[in-house]
Amino acid sequence: MRSMPGHSPVELRIPGESQSCSLKFLPDEQVKVGYSHKGNDLYWKIGLAIDDVDAASKCLGCSPGSQFLDIGFLTHLADPAGFCIELLQTTFEASSAQRARRLADRAASAAATSRLGQFVIGQITTRITEPTQSLDFYQKVLGMKLLSIQPVKRYNFTLYFLAYTEETPPNADLEAVENREWLWQRPYTTLELQHRWGSEPGSLRPAPPEEEGLVSIQVLWPKEQLSRLPLNPKGRLRDPDGLEIEVLAV
Protein backbone atom coordinates (compact mmCIF):
# COMPACT_ATOMS: atom_id res chain seq x y z
CA MET A 1 0.00 0.00 0.00
CA ARG A 2 1.23 3.51 -0.81
CA SER A 3 0.71 5.92 2.09
CA MET A 4 1.28 9.53 3.07
CA PRO A 5 4.90 10.62 3.73
CA GLY A 6 6.17 11.23 7.23
CA HIS A 7 6.07 7.66 8.51
CA SER A 8 8.46 4.73 8.41
CA PRO A 9 7.69 1.75 6.15
CA VAL A 10 5.69 -0.90 7.96
CA GLU A 11 5.13 -4.58 7.20
CA LEU A 12 2.29 -6.30 9.04
CA ARG A 13 2.21 -10.07 9.47
CA ILE A 14 -0.18 -12.42 11.24
CA PRO A 15 1.57 -13.67 14.43
CA GLY A 16 2.76 -17.26 14.61
CA GLU A 17 3.30 -19.62 11.70
CA SER A 18 0.56 -18.21 9.51
CA GLN A 19 0.47 -18.89 5.77
CA SER A 20 -1.25 -15.53 5.23
CA CYS A 21 0.25 -12.87 3.06
CA SER A 22 1.72 -9.80 4.72
CA LEU A 23 0.74 -6.16 4.15
CA LYS A 24 3.33 -3.47 3.45
CA PHE A 25 2.67 0.25 3.90
CA LEU A 26 5.21 2.37 2.06
CA PRO A 27 5.31 6.16 2.60
CA ASP A 28 5.79 8.04 -0.65
CA GLU A 29 6.75 11.69 -1.06
CA GLN A 30 4.54 11.92 -4.17
CA VAL A 31 1.39 11.19 -2.19
CA LYS A 32 -0.72 14.29 -1.51
CA VAL A 33 -4.24 12.82 -1.37
CA GLY A 34 -5.60 10.39 1.22
CA TYR A 35 -7.37 7.19 0.28
CA SER A 36 -10.96 7.39 -0.90
CA HIS A 37 -12.59 4.34 -2.44
CA LYS A 38 -14.33 4.78 -5.78
CA GLY A 39 -16.64 2.32 -7.46
CA ASN A 40 -14.39 1.86 -10.48
CA ASP A 41 -11.18 1.33 -8.47
CA LEU A 42 -9.03 -1.62 -9.51
CA TYR A 43 -8.43 -2.47 -5.84
CA TRP A 44 -11.34 -3.24 -3.51
CA LYS A 45 -10.50 -4.70 -0.08
CA ILE A 46 -8.77 -7.22 2.13
CA GLY A 47 -10.71 -9.96 3.90
CA LEU A 48 -9.96 -11.47 7.30
CA ALA A 49 -11.19 -15.03 7.84
CA ILE A 50 -12.44 -15.27 11.43
CA ASP A 51 -14.27 -18.01 13.34
CA ASP A 52 -16.59 -15.62 15.23
CA VAL A 53 -17.45 -12.44 13.31
CA ASP A 54 -19.92 -11.13 15.89
CA ALA A 55 -17.32 -11.32 18.67
CA ALA A 56 -14.78 -9.59 16.41
CA SER A 57 -17.25 -6.87 15.42
CA LYS A 58 -17.97 -6.10 19.09
CA CYS A 59 -14.25 -5.88 19.74
CA LEU A 60 -13.76 -3.47 16.82
CA GLY A 61 -16.93 -1.46 17.33
CA CYS A 62 -18.32 -2.12 13.85
CA SER A 63 -21.65 -3.44 12.60
CA PRO A 64 -22.49 -7.06 13.50
CA GLY A 65 -22.29 -9.72 10.85
CA SER A 66 -25.10 -10.99 8.64
CA GLN A 67 -25.46 -13.83 6.16
CA PHE A 68 -24.89 -12.45 2.65
CA LEU A 69 -26.90 -14.75 0.36
CA ASP A 70 -25.09 -18.09 -0.04
CA ILE A 71 -21.65 -16.43 0.05
CA GLY A 72 -20.86 -16.05 3.75
CA PHE A 73 -21.53 -14.48 7.12
CA LEU A 74 -19.72 -11.15 7.08
CA THR A 75 -19.46 -7.49 7.90
CA HIS A 76 -17.29 -4.56 6.75
CA LEU A 77 -15.35 -1.77 8.36
CA ALA A 78 -12.68 0.73 7.35
CA ASP A 79 -9.23 1.24 8.86
CA PRO A 80 -8.19 4.78 9.96
CA ALA A 81 -7.01 5.58 6.42
CA GLY A 82 -10.31 4.45 4.90
CA PHE A 83 -9.22 1.12 3.39
CA CYS A 84 -12.05 -1.43 3.40
CA ILE A 85 -11.71 -4.55 5.54
CA GLU A 86 -14.13 -7.45 5.34
CA LEU A 87 -14.61 -9.75 8.32
CA LEU A 88 -15.66 -13.09 6.82
CA GLN A 89 -16.71 -15.93 9.10
CA THR A 90 -15.29 -19.38 8.41
CA THR A 91 -18.80 -20.86 8.74
CA PHE A 92 -22.25 -19.84 7.53
CA GLU A 93 -24.71 -18.37 10.02
CA ALA A 94 -26.66 -21.67 10.11
CA SER A 95 -23.57 -23.80 10.80
CA SER A 96 -23.63 -23.26 14.56
CA ALA A 97 -22.43 -26.76 15.49
CA GLN A 98 -19.42 -26.59 13.17
CA ARG A 99 -18.59 -23.10 14.45
CA ALA A 100 -18.74 -24.25 18.08
CA ARG A 101 -16.35 -27.12 17.28
CA ARG A 102 -13.90 -24.80 15.56
CA LEU A 103 -13.96 -22.34 18.46
CA ALA A 104 -13.44 -25.16 20.96
CA ASP A 105 -10.56 -26.60 18.94
CA ARG A 106 -8.94 -23.16 18.72
CA ALA A 107 -9.25 -22.63 22.46
CA ALA A 108 -7.74 -26.04 23.20
CA SER A 109 -4.87 -25.87 20.71
CA ALA A 110 -3.38 -22.39 21.02
CA ALA A 111 -3.69 -18.97 22.59
CA ALA A 112 -5.39 -16.26 20.58
CA THR A 113 -3.11 -14.25 18.31
CA SER A 114 -4.99 -11.01 18.99
CA ARG A 115 -8.08 -9.59 20.63
CA LEU A 116 -9.97 -10.89 17.60
CA GLY A 117 -8.83 -14.46 18.22
CA GLN A 118 -6.97 -16.40 15.56
CA PHE A 119 -7.49 -15.29 11.98
CA VAL A 120 -5.83 -15.19 8.58
CA ILE A 121 -5.79 -12.67 5.77
CA GLY A 122 -8.15 -14.72 3.68
CA GLN A 123 -8.53 -12.53 0.60
CA ILE A 124 -6.93 -9.72 -1.32
CA THR A 125 -9.70 -8.45 -3.61
CA THR A 126 -9.26 -6.68 -6.92
CA ARG A 127 -11.56 -6.16 -9.88
CA ILE A 128 -11.44 -7.43 -13.46
CA THR A 129 -13.33 -6.72 -16.68
CA GLU A 130 -12.58 -9.80 -18.84
CA PRO A 131 -12.76 -13.04 -16.79
CA THR A 132 -11.39 -15.30 -19.54
CA GLN A 133 -8.28 -13.16 -20.04
CA SER A 134 -7.72 -12.63 -16.32
CA LEU A 135 -8.12 -16.30 -15.42
CA ASP A 136 -5.76 -17.28 -18.23
CA PHE A 137 -3.21 -14.81 -16.89
CA TYR A 138 -3.36 -15.90 -13.26
CA GLN A 139 -3.48 -19.62 -14.04
CA LYS A 140 -1.27 -19.99 -17.10
CA VAL A 141 1.24 -17.18 -16.51
CA LEU A 142 1.43 -17.00 -12.71
CA GLY A 143 0.57 -20.63 -12.03
CA MET A 144 -2.27 -20.09 -9.57
CA LYS A 145 -5.12 -22.55 -9.05
CA LEU A 146 -8.79 -21.62 -9.42
CA LEU A 147 -10.64 -22.80 -6.30
CA SER A 148 -14.11 -21.27 -6.47
CA ILE A 149 -16.49 -19.39 -8.77
CA GLN A 150 -19.33 -17.56 -7.04
CA PRO A 151 -21.98 -15.84 -9.20
CA VAL A 152 -23.96 -13.20 -7.30
CA LYS A 153 -26.89 -12.76 -9.65
CA ARG A 154 -28.85 -10.39 -7.42
CA TYR A 155 -26.06 -7.80 -7.65
CA ASN A 156 -24.75 -8.62 -11.15
CA PHE A 157 -21.22 -9.74 -10.36
CA THR A 158 -19.16 -12.91 -10.09
CA LEU A 159 -16.31 -13.69 -7.70
CA TYR A 160 -13.33 -15.85 -8.63
CA PHE A 161 -10.88 -17.17 -6.02
CA LEU A 162 -7.35 -18.35 -6.82
CA ALA A 163 -4.38 -19.41 -4.71
CA TYR A 164 -1.00 -21.11 -4.74
CA THR A 165 -2.00 -24.50 -3.36
CA GLU A 166 -2.17 -28.20 -4.17
CA GLU A 167 -5.49 -28.52 -2.36
CA THR A 168 -8.68 -29.42 -4.22
CA PRO A 169 -12.17 -28.24 -3.23
CA PRO A 170 -14.55 -30.94 -1.91
CA ASN A 171 -16.87 -30.60 -4.90
CA ALA A 172 -15.41 -30.61 -8.41
CA ASP A 173 -18.09 -28.11 -9.47
CA LEU A 174 -16.33 -24.85 -8.59
CA GLU A 175 -19.68 -23.05 -8.33
CA ALA A 176 -20.93 -25.48 -5.66
CA VAL A 177 -22.05 -23.73 -2.46
CA GLU A 178 -20.59 -26.54 -0.34
CA ASN A 179 -17.08 -25.42 -1.33
CA ARG A 180 -17.50 -21.99 0.22
CA GLU A 181 -17.14 -22.73 3.91
CA TRP A 182 -14.21 -24.97 2.99
CA LEU A 183 -12.65 -22.02 1.16
CA TRP A 184 -13.13 -19.61 4.08
CA GLN A 185 -11.32 -22.09 6.34
CA ARG A 186 -8.10 -22.27 4.30
CA PRO A 187 -4.96 -21.24 6.25
CA TYR A 188 -3.58 -19.23 3.32
CA THR A 189 -4.50 -16.09 1.40
CA THR A 190 -6.52 -16.28 -1.80
CA LEU A 191 -6.69 -13.72 -4.58
CA GLU A 192 -10.33 -12.71 -5.08
CA LEU A 193 -11.30 -11.24 -8.45
CA GLN A 194 -14.63 -9.42 -8.73
CA HIS A 195 -16.13 -9.17 -12.21
CA ARG A 196 -19.06 -6.77 -12.40
CA TRP A 197 -21.13 -7.81 -15.37
CA GLY A 198 -21.01 -5.36 -18.23
CA SER A 199 -17.79 -3.64 -17.12
CA GLU A 200 -15.64 -2.57 -20.04
CA PRO A 201 -11.88 -3.09 -20.52
CA GLY A 202 -10.03 0.03 -19.48
CA SER A 203 -12.77 1.15 -17.08
CA LEU A 204 -10.95 0.22 -13.87
CA ARG A 205 -8.84 2.83 -12.12
CA PRO A 206 -5.44 2.09 -10.55
CA ALA A 207 -4.48 4.48 -7.77
CA PRO A 208 -2.47 7.37 -9.32
CA PRO A 209 0.95 8.20 -7.80
CA GLU A 210 -0.35 11.21 -5.88
CA GLU A 211 -2.98 9.16 -4.00
CA GLU A 212 -2.84 6.57 -1.25
CA GLY A 213 -3.73 3.13 -2.56
CA LEU A 214 -2.59 -0.29 -3.65
CA VAL A 215 0.80 -0.23 -5.37
CA SER A 216 1.14 -3.89 -6.32
CA ILE A 217 0.85 -7.42 -5.09
CA GLN A 218 3.98 -9.50 -4.63
CA VAL A 219 4.45 -13.17 -5.42
CA LEU A 220 7.39 -15.41 -4.59
CA TRP A 221 8.81 -17.26 -7.59
CA PRO A 222 11.60 -19.87 -7.97
CA LYS A 223 14.69 -18.07 -9.19
CA GLU A 224 15.44 -20.72 -11.81
CA GLN A 225 12.01 -20.20 -13.41
CA LEU A 226 12.05 -16.41 -13.68
CA SER A 227 13.01 -16.51 -17.35
CA ARG A 228 9.61 -17.90 -18.33
CA LEU A 229 7.77 -14.82 -17.03
CA PRO A 230 7.29 -11.73 -19.26
CA LEU A 231 8.86 -9.38 -16.71
CA ASN A 232 9.75 -5.74 -17.33
CA PRO A 233 13.24 -4.46 -16.34
CA LYS A 234 11.98 -3.81 -12.78
CA GLY A 235 10.96 -7.45 -12.33
CA ARG A 236 7.26 -6.75 -12.66
CA LEU A 237 4.34 -7.48 -14.94
CA ARG A 238 0.71 -6.36 -15.15
CA ASP A 239 -2.52 -8.31 -15.28
CA PRO A 240 -4.99 -7.62 -18.13
CA ASP A 241 -6.60 -4.74 -16.19
CA GLY A 242 -3.33 -3.09 -15.19
CA LEU A 243 -2.74 -4.47 -11.69
CA GLU A 244 1.00 -4.51 -11.08
CA ILE A 245 2.51 -7.83 -9.96
CA GLU A 246 5.97 -7.72 -8.38
CA VAL A 247 7.85 -11.01 -8.62
CA LEU A 248 10.38 -11.82 -5.89
CA ALA A 249 12.90 -14.56 -6.62
CA VAL A 250 13.39 -17.22 -3.94
Image (cartoon, rainbow, N blue to C red):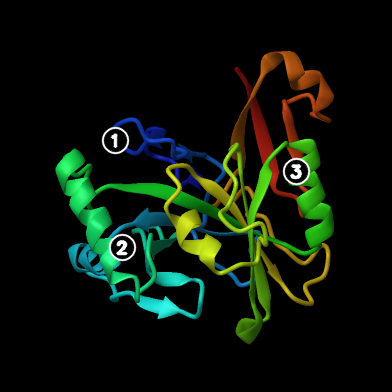
Q: Is residue 87 visible to the viewer in this orientation of the structure? A: yes
Q: Position of residue 157 (x, y in %)?
A: 67, 75
Name which residue type carries label 3. Answer: Gln
Q: Is residue 118 above or below residue 193?
A: above
Distance from label 2 to label 1 (Cα)?
25 Å
Q: Give the mark nearer the N terminus: 3 vs 1.
A: 1
What residue did someone put label 1 on? 15
Image mark for residue 105: none
Q: Is residue 185 above or below residue 179?
A: above
Name the residue nearer the viewer: 47 or 171. 171
Name which residue type carries label 2. Answer: Gln
Quick check: 164 left or right of 181?
Answer: right
Q: Are marks 2 and 1 in contact (CB under 8 Å)?
A: no
Query: Quadrant of the rendered structure where residue 97 is?
Result: bottom left
Q: Are marks 2 and 3 in contact (CB under 8 Å)?
A: no
What residue did someone put label 3 on? 139
Distance from label 3 to label 1 (Cα)?
30 Å
* Secondary structure type for disc 2: helix
Q: Quadrant of the C terminus?
A: top right
The mark total stands at 3
* Secondary structure type for disc 3: helix
Q: Nearer the viewer, mark 3 or mark 1?
A: 3
Q: Nearer the viewer, mark 2 or mark 1?
A: 2
Badge 3: few (under 14), some or many (20 or more) residues near its Cα, within 10 Å?
some
Badge 2: few (under 14), some or many (20 or more) residues near its Cα, within 10 Å?
few
Which residue is depicted at the point 60% across and 58% down?
171
What residue did someone put label 2 on? 98
Q: Position of residue 232 (x, y in %)?
A: 80, 29
Distance from label 2 to label 3 (Cα)?
32 Å
Q: Give the mark nearer the N terminus: 2 vs 1.
A: 1
* Secondary structure type for disc 1: loop
Name which residue type carries label 1. Answer: Pro
